[in-house]
Amino acid sequence: MIATEEIIKTPFYKAIGKECDVFEHSFQNKLPLLIKGPTGTGKSRFVAYMASQLDQKMITISCHEETSSTDLIGRFIIKGAETIWLDGPLTTAVKNGYILYLDEVAEARPDVVVAIHSLTDHRRELFIDKLNETVKAHEKFMLVASFNPGYQRGFKELKPSTRQRFIALSFNFPDAKLEEEILIKETGVDADIAKRLVNIGNKVRNLTELGLTETVSTRLLVDAAKLICSGLANRLSVKVAVMEPLSDEPQVLTALYDLTDLMM
Ligand code: ADP
């Protein structure tokens, strides 16, 4: 399954800046929103939180290299002797006025970007080529996409002509006090451990010489805090939740393990 329709209960989200206002105004003005930032910085959580605040249903699509416009728009399926049309998640969201969240949009096949073009400008309509039909978006429909700008190799880019169709927000790692608060609220970990975890996170984030493709995200720190809260030893929790996911290179891991022993 690439999509889930969620009935939102308000999830916990700690605002970092003015992002909630930006989201709300984008929604009111029927403007699509692009959220840029590394993985694990709260982008998905933020969208879920805003959907709940705005009393909107939300469909999430985690895009990958096989995600095509057919997956989003819909397809004919054979049912008994009949061929019937099945709306895809994008069409469902457009017709019913949901928030459609395209997570990691740059990973999807190029036809996905083509399919959403007419939804990202004044037309706000979706062309269903297989039905030769154009659907006007419900007034509450909103398109939100996330994108990892990938300062390092291995990430796909988003064309400037596509980017310019969106209001854009940058997400990054929160400052230390906020990140500690997130860990405590999210997991119930005590303040001293939260502080240490955030210190380790920031230390690794600054060690650019390790050449990590992705660095310590808030998500990894949350995972470590969860393990600690459930009784796993502090250092082991950090090693398996934070360090191991970052690298497979023995030398890098040794450095990260040493750091853990020093700081935890
Ligand atoms: P992304 O979509 O950017 O990859 P997520 O939204 O999945 O990241 O965030 C990963 C985890 O980090 C969340 O499940 C949550 O526990 C935590 N998190 C990150 N930022 C925040 C925040 N500002 N408020 C609350 N939780 C956060």
Image: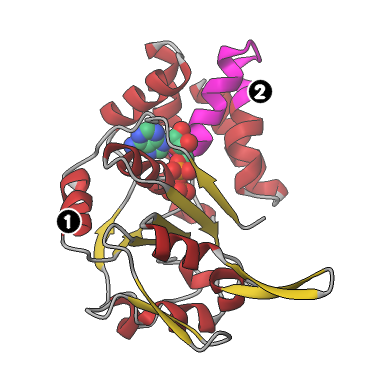
Compared with 54, 37 (above or below) is below
Compared with 13, 169 (above or below) is below
| Observer able to see residue 148 | no
Compare marks 1 and 2 and give the one earlier in the sequence: 1
- Residue 218 lies in the magenta stretch: yes
Q: Position of residue 59 (x, y in %)?
A: 48, 53
Kind of residue at disc 2: Leu
Q: 88 or 78, which is in the foreground?
A: 78
Mark 1 or 2, which is nearer the eye? 1
Q: Which residue is mark 2?
A: 236
Q: Which mark is residue 154?
A: none
Q: 63 or 97, which is in the foreground?
A: 97
Main SS of the magenta segment? Answer: helix
Q: Position of residue 233 (x, y in %)?
A: 64, 14
Residue 200's image quarter? top left
Task: Decide if residue 33 is on the left or right side of residue 250.
Answer: left
Compared with 201, 38 (above or below) is below
Task: Decide if residue 206 is on the left or right side of residue 209.
Answer: left
Task: Decide if residue 239 is on the left or right side of residue 167.
Answer: right
Residue 194's image quarter? top left
Q: Position of residue 180 (x, y in %)?
A: 35, 24
Q: Secondary structure at mark 1?
A: helix
Q: 250 or 14, which is in the foreground?
A: 14
Kind of residue at disc 1: Gln
**At x 15% / y 54%, what residue is drawn?**
25
Cβ atoms at labels 1 and 2 below 8 Å apart = no
Q: Which residue is mark 1?
A: 28
Q: Secondary structure at mark 2?
A: helix
- Residue 116 lies in the magenta stretch: no
**At x 16% / y 47%, what residue is drawn?**
21
Q: Tell me where the magenta segment starts and ends, as one range.
A: 217-237
**At x 33% / y 49%, what residue is drawn?**
172
